Amino acid sequence: MIAERHDGTGLVRHDVALDESLIDPDAAKVVRRLERAGFQAYLVGGCVRDLLLGSKPKDFDIATSARPEDVKGLFRNCRVIGRRFRLAHILFQGGKVVEVATFRRSPQTEAPEDDSEAIDEDILIRSDNVFGEAHEDALRRDFTINALFYDLDRRQVLDWCGGMPHIQGRTIHTIGDPIVRFREDPVRLLRAIKFAARLDLGIEPDVYDAMVGQRGELARAARPRLFEEILRLMRGGAAHRSMWLLWEIGAMAVLLPELAAYLDDDDATEGGGARFFRRMDAIDRKTKQRGGPLDDGVLFTALLHEPLAESMLGAGDPVAAAYEFLDPIVERIALPRRIADGLRRIVAILPRLAAGRAGRFLRTDLAMPAIEALEIDLVARGKSTEIIERLRSEAQLAAPAVSPRSSGGHRGGGAPHFRPNRTARRG
């Protein structure tokens, strides 16, 4: 019986009638079909958190007792993806994907609380694909606010980790010892920043202290994950607070020491820090105005513009100076080389673009991203942006004709953006 589910697991049930008009109907259909087939299935994670906080979820994920092959057997529109971490994707019209994950449990045991020496490098999670029960799935998650499950039929939030009081208090708490959690997966530190900034949440003092103390662990994280999480900090409409927190806790000095050093020396840069955060404000406004993120290359240009320009200033070989600046970043966070190359070219052309002397550059793929980067820079410096619309018009006229087949995937009908194609897990 449903009433006997999860007995003896420490579950606390909260009667919460979430607004069903905000729940994706296709996700609800998936949950109910799994339940009719005899499996446990719940909305889980970020969508539950966002609904409870009064935000509109971006995605609706489902956790279930069904194995990926069971899900595939129930849905003709299902694809099982991944080798190490197998997930079921249910595909719907318009490109919508509802992700269904089988309950998992942590593959390793937490180090004893009284033995700090036992928390060593081997605690880093390298595998997370061991099937388990619902309560084990909740306990293996990072933060209590992300470990809430929603039972659609009973209209209850299932809480094994004390997340509901933290939702109500709008604070971020880890599940278990924050030092252990950040050492298990240092990227959790960046996720804490993302949630605090994007959802306007406070960070519990012990968690904050652990973030400061464990920031050096980020050097051990997988480099592509670092790149993706930095982008997520920039994409969500809260780049200003995200970057401020990253800098304040010292994590920027680990990931982007070139930028951290620039922000640390505000006198020498004559207000460079203030200009940097005005850039972040401009990004946030644009993100909200268009209802989605800016081009990845534009985001990284805004992030590194002034430190990179400073490294090139007065250099006998500006191109070599730019690569000397960018190569360590490429290595440290797996910055794609094509983004680094585009960033170098945009920063080099911006003075000419601002003076209206772009010439043949307006016929290149980088013209539109460069114009957007220029607009952000002019706003940050408190200068007029009157030239921007003229440059956009000239770039559209200068853009070579593109056939419908080759133009797919590019924004604005003109120059393509240079966002790398990749598949990343949502979070």
Image: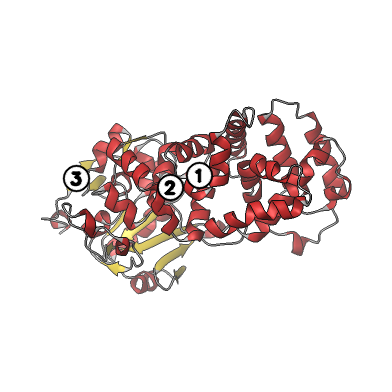
Task: Give the left or right position of residue 252, taking residue 312 as reference.
Answer: left
Label 2, on which residue? 190
Q: Does dot 2 land on a helix, a strand or a loop?
A: helix
Residue 218 in picture, x, y percent from top left? 42, 53
Q: Residue at x 60, y 42 (%)?
A: 303
- Please tell me the numbered disc located at residue 233: 1
**Other residues around mark 1 within 10 Å, as few (<14) / some (14–19) / many (≥20):** many
| Rendered image quadrant of residue 328 | bottom right
Nearer the observer, 367 or 332: 332
Q: Could you say where residue 286 lies in the image, as x and y percent from the top left? A: 62, 36
Q: CA distance from mark 2 to mark 3?
A: 30 Å
Which amino acid is tagged 3? Answer: Arg
Q: Does 338 appear above or below 197?
A: below
Q: CA distance from mark 3 to mark 1?
A: 33 Å
Split into 4 quadrants, where in the image is the N terminus?
A: bottom left
> Which three-letter amino acid code belongs to the residue tagged 2?
Leu
Q: Nearer the viewer, mark 2 or mark 3?
A: 2
**Local SS, label 1:** helix
Tag on residue 363? none
Residue ID for mark 3: 13
